[in-house]
Image (cartoon, grey):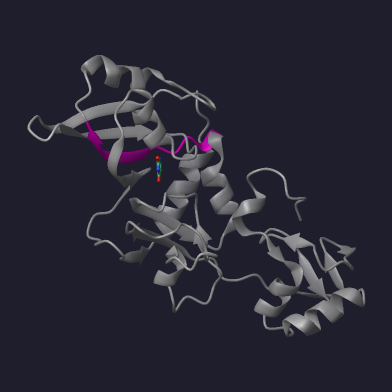
């Protein structure tokens, strides 16, 4: 049960009455009545307010009976451009979860890709796993392929690698590689590997050296690739992959 601050609460916080309803114990309204009647406990304490949000790591009990948490599921998704990285969108735009109509679990994306960015996105209902991967100390490497307007010099790419000043601070060391350039069109394709996950980071890094991004795709997340998937496709992660990701995120960085 978090109080609404920090990165954790954006991931899988749900209203208590919704969690109870989702577990099939009662309708949303009945769940509200149970809460108001003092019959619901969170982590051993009675909760009587309706605004409280809980995550999958909180222990919820209704009349002394634990609310079973969902079976954890993990997906690797090839997000198309023009899709929002959230569970639903107020403006009615297509959301990543629209691609998983048969999945009963309440899955949500691990981090975000911009509306206009395509590529590898993980989705899960395992809040602890998502938090672990998204925590800055995990330093999970992400490989992006950017088509940029203009052709940067070797020194400019080097400045991206060393770290560049953005409005929210200097970026951590990165790797940048020119994959191809088109002198006639005045554009280049660059592979950029970063381990931070700031908002619109890749676009802002290229803008900072004077080259707007025209197209962006996330090609790799840790050791996971888009291999064998088409845009809009998804596959489940194997148990081994989930374990490997956990181990990687928990490895102490020097
Ligand atoms: N960096 C960006 O600029 N956009 C993304 O979607 C991901 C990383």
Magenta region, residue range? 137-149
Residue 203 lies in what quarter of the image?
top left
Q: Main secondary structure of the magenta part?
A: strand
Left or right: 83 with respect to 45? left
Rendered residue at 34%/23% (across/down): 209
Instruction: Specify the farthest residue to the right.
Output: 37
Where is residue 212? Give x, y as percent: 31, 34
Q: For this view, does 167 lie left or right of residue 189? A: right
Q: Quadrant of residue 30?
A: bottom right
Question: Is residue 177 toward the left or the right of residue 36 in the image?
Answer: left
Residue located farthest toward the top when viewing the structure as drawn: 155
In the rendered image, the vertical position of residue 12 relative to residue 7, given as above or below = below
Q: Quadrant of ligand 1?
A: top left
Label count reads 0
Verify whether residue 143 appears in magenta.
yes
Residue 170 shows up from this direction: yes
Whether residue 39 is visible here, answered yes or no, is: no
The residue at the point 23 percent across, 28 percent down is 177
Residue 102 rendering spot, x and y as whole percentages: 44, 79
């Amino acid at each position: 049960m978090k109080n609404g601050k920090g990165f954790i609460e954006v991931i899988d916080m749900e209203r208590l009455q919704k969690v109870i309803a989702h577990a099939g114990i009662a309708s949303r309204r009945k769940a509200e009545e149970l809460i108001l009647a003092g019959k619901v406990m969170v982590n051993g304490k009675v909760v009587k307010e309706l605004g409280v949000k809980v995550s999958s790591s909180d222990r919820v009990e209704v009349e002394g009976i634990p609310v079973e948490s969902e079976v954890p599921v993990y997906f690797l998704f090839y997000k198309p451009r023009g899709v929002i990285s959230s569970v639903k969108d107020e403006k009615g735009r297509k959301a990543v979860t629209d691609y998983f109509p048969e999945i009963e679990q309440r899955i949500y994306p691990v981090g975000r890709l911009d509306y206009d960015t395509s590529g590898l996105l993980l989705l899960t209902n395992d809040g602890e796993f998502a938090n672990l991967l998204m925590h800055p100390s995990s330093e999970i490497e992400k490989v992006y392929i950017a088509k940029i307007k203009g052709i940067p010099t070797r020194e400019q790419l080097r400045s991206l690698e060393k770290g560049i000043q953005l409005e929210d601070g200097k970026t951590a060391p990165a790797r940048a590689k020119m994959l191809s350039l088109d002198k006639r069109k005045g554009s280049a394709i660059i592979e950029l590997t970063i381990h931070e996950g700031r908002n619109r980071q890749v676009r802002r890094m290229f803008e900072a050296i004077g080259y707007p991004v025209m197209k962006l795709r996330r090609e790799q997340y840790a050791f996971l690739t888009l291999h064998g998937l088409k845009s809009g496709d998804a596959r489940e992660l194997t148990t081994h992959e989930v374990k490997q990701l956990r181990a990687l995120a928990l490895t102490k960085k020097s």
